[in-house]
Image (cartoon, helix red, strand yellow):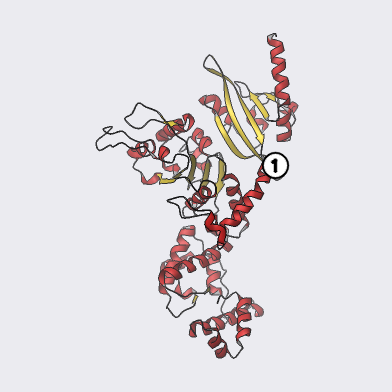
Amino acid sequence: MTLEEENQCLREIVSHVSEGVILTDRACQITIFNPAKERMERMNAQEVLGKISWDAYSHSSKELSEHRQVFDSGAPILNAYRPHAYVGETPIYIHYSTYPVTRNGEVIGVYTVSRNETILRELLYETIEHKRLLSQEGDPRAELLGMAKGTHFTFSDMVGSSPAMKALVREAQTVAPLNTPILITGETGTGKEVLAQSIHNFGREQKKFVAINCAAIPENLVEGVLFGTTKGAYTGAVDSVGLLREAEDGTLFLDEINSISTAMQAKLLRALQEMSVRPVGSLKEYPIRCRLICASNEDPEVLLREKRMRSDLFYRVAGFCLFIPPLRQRSEDAVELARLFVKRFNREFGRHVKSLSPRLEGWIKSAHWPGNTRELQNVIQNMMLRVEETEWALDVRHIPAYARHLQTQTAAPPGPEENVPGRWDLNGLLRDYQRQLLQTALNQSKGNITQAAASLGIGRQNLLARMKRLGIEK
């Protein structure tokens, strides 16, 4: 077979495989764009052949081009998984790897082999939905799930009925069974470790979960903590395996990865590329086998633009990206979380709070919450410590002084005694007033339904019906 015939055979093979294949040359010009890739991207090969790769894709740029990254580094990008292309508003979920083509040690081209996993992803939903049921709070089968040692959270702790939170949980549960590295982004206090533990316990609950906050490690100790040390490597050094090896077959969670220096990022990148580490002071390489989840409290785009995060490390750790919206963007979730914290602190402090007053709910929804879920939990904790043992409802009067500045919008419903000319909502005011009367009666009777009903001059069943209609718990 001549070289020309061999090339013809290879091109025929590439044109008939079910995986999408794209090849670029030294200048990042597209030279191969097979039919499977055309179907996957909804693009015509004739329209993209000869184009620079980042010019062919509207969502790409030279800085974000993975082909450019592989060409410069000579290292492949393996097992990436993300919404890669869009048809209308529908994401196409693609699993792909990008490899360099070398000759005499020089990179002469880069190619990507990709597989459309949208259908597989949808088929997984049945299994995922079944497991989701097991993880729901209050489900007696939840005990079957178990939790890894050192973890406290599952997806049942991801409280929130907002569309954003529902979408986040669904995406996280979809990627949880895979080995794809995950990058979680979100402001401080949004619950990034809660999400990381939930992902681990959804797919690897029998394996180790090892977590470290990179910002808490002194710069000169980061390498030893992650890679391990040998005795005598430096003063006080002992033999240790390092976190990358300690998390064998499980999950390593690196929180605030954005705090690692770029020099250390280069060492971490090498370890992840080679899937092996060399402990400080050792000449021996050890294999690593763990799933990596990283978190950043800063926007990756800003980190990349300001060169505080290496782009090659970003591509390595961000096989799939998850963003937790701040609490101020999902006010309905804030009230749900507040109720959850009330139940938790009832048990911890021996209180008997059953509900939040309408005015407090309004205040919670309108507050800015710069510290997000963590700050909300702290405020509710302080309020619960201020509640008398005979009180059955939290109200705005329990808000600690340091937190009163949080309200930035007008949302709290006015009480019936307040004069609000031009804004009367008679039905709403009557409903709020009725709720307050019922809560006062329940507080005075210490939760005794019969006594509360008698003090209000109504029957017990009547009171129960009103409590249900107004959202007051027994």
Q: Quadrant of the N terminus?
A: top right
Q: Which residue is mark 1?
A: 119
Q: Which residue is drawn at the image coordinates 61% and 46% (left, top)?
A: 174
* Quadrant assignment, res 349: bottom left
Quadrant in which the C terminus appears: bottom right
Tell me the kind of residue under disc 1.
Answer: Ile
The image shows residue 82, relative to residue 101, as above or below, that is below
Residue 242 lies, in percent from the top left, at 37, 38
Pick the residue in front: 198 or 402.
198
Residue ranking furthest to the top:
2
Q: Reply above or below: 387 against 108.
A: below
Q: Quadrant of residue 460?
A: bottom right
Mark 1 falls on what kind of element? Answer: helix
Pick whichever, 291 or 268, lies toward us.
Answer: 291
Q: Position of residue 63 (x, y in %)?
A: 56, 33
Q: Residue at x 63, y 53 (%)?
A: 130
Q: Please state the horizontal and vertical placement of residue 379, each as a whole percent of the image.
A: 44, 66
